[in-house]
Image (cartoon, rainbow, N blue to C red):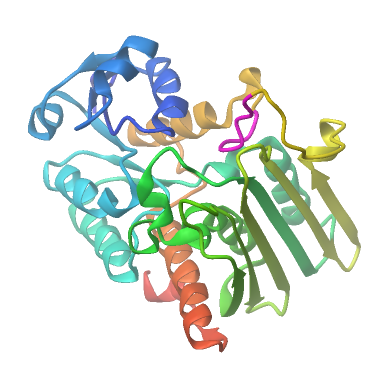
Amino acid sequence: MTQHPPRIGLVGAGGIARAHLPNLLRLGDVFVYSEEGAPELVAAYGGVVVHSLDELLARVDVVDVVVPTFAHAEIVRAALAAGKPVISEKPLALTDADASDLVARAEHAGIPLYPAHVVRFFPEYVRLKQAVDSGLLGDLAVLRLSRSGAFPTRAAWYADHALSGGIIMDQMIHDLDMARWLAGEVVRVSAVTAGIPDADNPVQAAHVLLTHASGAISQVSGLWGPQHLAFTTEYSVTGTLGCLSHSSAAERNYRSDLAASEAVDGLLPRIDPAEDPYYLELREYLGAILGGQVPRVSAADGAIAVAIANAALKSLETGQPTDLPVLSEVLA
């Protein structure tokens, strides 16, 4: 790809598009297509509205997919068929079959496909990964990762598990991916959940227990709570040589979560504009597409994260642990 600046197509105009578009504009010329909301999004941040997916694919060099989860596979397939490198918001797809198919199509065509697992770019998680890789913690034994935030009410499809995958697929997939990135392949998954969100009571919690091939155990917890609940993340990772922990609530001198009259955005984490993880993520992916270094997230990573999340959902249905093959070998 020789176009400078690159022409980037953003497909979708929902909540996460507001984290992507300003950063994409720092990296190239951006064209936006969405069935709803594109003019308002462009008016707020910039870019050029286009009026069909075909028009967008004809005008751009790379596609960033931020449509609702249930539409990811369809849009990614269309972009790959048009020969366009793709960045796709997580999860890569809702089903294992779709996720594996997207990976296979991209590999067969020799087209880059990168799932947007942005937590790998947050500084507190980058520091954790560096500590693990350097041997500072020794052999990992127990990992605890959690995140909490307001139930996403901006679109009705979040409450429909057939469309969103629920809290495990939509929210907790970040920490499921992190656990594997840190402790290696996952061979067994079990899960429990409380609460079935609906319009009157949009609250849900879940816990997922991962057994890694290394013998390490990860406990991943997630909460979709009331609208006043601020977004927080925590981890505690213990190995044979020590423990490293993080709490975003403690870092903000956080004391309590009580309903207040002012609006609180509990859907996305607060970020440092000088070190915006969404910008770092998009810059790394675009750099790789333009011939730079291989990024820290691969298409296979995205498909494996989907498979782990679906194994947890299967465990919820059966009440039994779900065994997994070593998926990195299956997708190799």
Quarter holding residue 145:
bottom right
Query: x, y percentage for residue 130?
Result: 73, 47
Query: x, y percentage for residue 137?
Result: 84, 59
Q: Is residue 325 visible?
A: no
Q: From the viewer's perspective, is 29 left or right of 198?
A: left
Q: Up-down: is 281 above or below 8?
A: below
Q: From the viewer's perspective, is 66 left or right of 304?
A: left
Q: Is residue 111 visible?
A: yes
Query: x, y percentage for residue 112?
Result: 30, 45
Of residue 272 and residue 67, the one placed in the foreground of this image is 67
Magenta region includes residue 252: no
Predominant SS of the magenta segment: loop
Of residue 200 and residue 160, the one placed in the foreground of this image is 200
Q: From the viewer's perspective, is 52 left or right of 144?
A: left
Seen at 42% across and 28% down, the residue is 20
In the image, which residues are magenta?
A: 263-270
Seen at 32% across and 10% down, the residue is 43
